[in-house]
Image: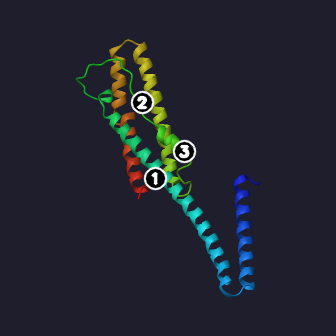
Amino acid sequence: MLTPRRLIVVVTAASLIAACVINVVWFARSSGTSRLEPIVGVLGILAGITGLVAERWAAARESRDAALEAIGTELRANRELLASDAFGDDPNQPLRRQVFPRLYLSAVDAAFASGSLSSTQDAEMITELHAWRNQVVRFNSQLALAEILAFTVESESVLRDLRDGLHGTDGPLARIRTAIEGLLGRLAVAAR
């Protein structure tokens, strides 16, 4: 199927080949100082091609770096959020109904939507970020369900069970914190 991108590649390649053929013929038929003009033309064409390729590579690299930085910033913000009083585990703290803050996902979603991460270079990172995204969506949904339960059932034992379940050794907070630290370590390696 001929897409606009492929059409551009075909037209560009054909134009470059034609320009090179014309310059070679020109070089073969010219004499004296005008003989250098085709060489200058070919060098100009090669410089233009090299510049375009290098600019696209640099733009893709900048986009990737910006996406990784934004994801890192978002993960650190989520780590701070989980360390806030809203998710505190002080057993002396009175049990109360509350609306929990939600974890952020916008940088991960933006990285996926923009295609900033390379499917070849960042394949493992993309897989881990998809798993992270699913985990955060599940966690935020569980928080919503816990809030509904806490506000509809007026029982201190329900609030205690919710707090204990949230802060258990293999509870959602522990899993989320572990995932954040793992992703931050992965980002540090990927940013090099």
Left or right relative to 192: residue 130:
right
Which residue is painted at 25% across and 27% down in the image? 90
Q: Earlier in the sequence, mark 2 or mark 1?
A: 1
Question: Residue 164 or 129: which is nearer the viewer?
Answer: 129
Residue 152, horizontal then vertical, whole percent: 43, 13
Q: Which residue is mark 3?
A: 112
Which residue is at the far left?
92
Which residue is painted at 44% across and 32% down in the image? 139
Question: Residue 140 or 172: which is nearer the viewer?
Answer: 140
Q: Which residue is mark 1?
A: 65
Residue 115, horizontal then vertical, whole percent: 56, 48
Name the amino acid, label 1.
Asp
Which numbered mark, 3 or 1, is in the foreground of this view?
A: 1
Asked if residue 100 is positioned above or below residue 39 in the image, the reply reads above
Question: Residue 141 or 50: which is nearer the viewer?
Answer: 50
Name the amino acid, label 3.
Phe
Task: Give SS at disc 2.
Answer: loop
Q: Which residue is mark 2?
A: 102
Task: Give SS at disc 3.
Answer: helix
Which residue is painted at 34% across and 34% down in the image? 82
Task: Give SS at disc 1.
Answer: helix
Spatial CA distance of label 3 from label 1 is 14 Å
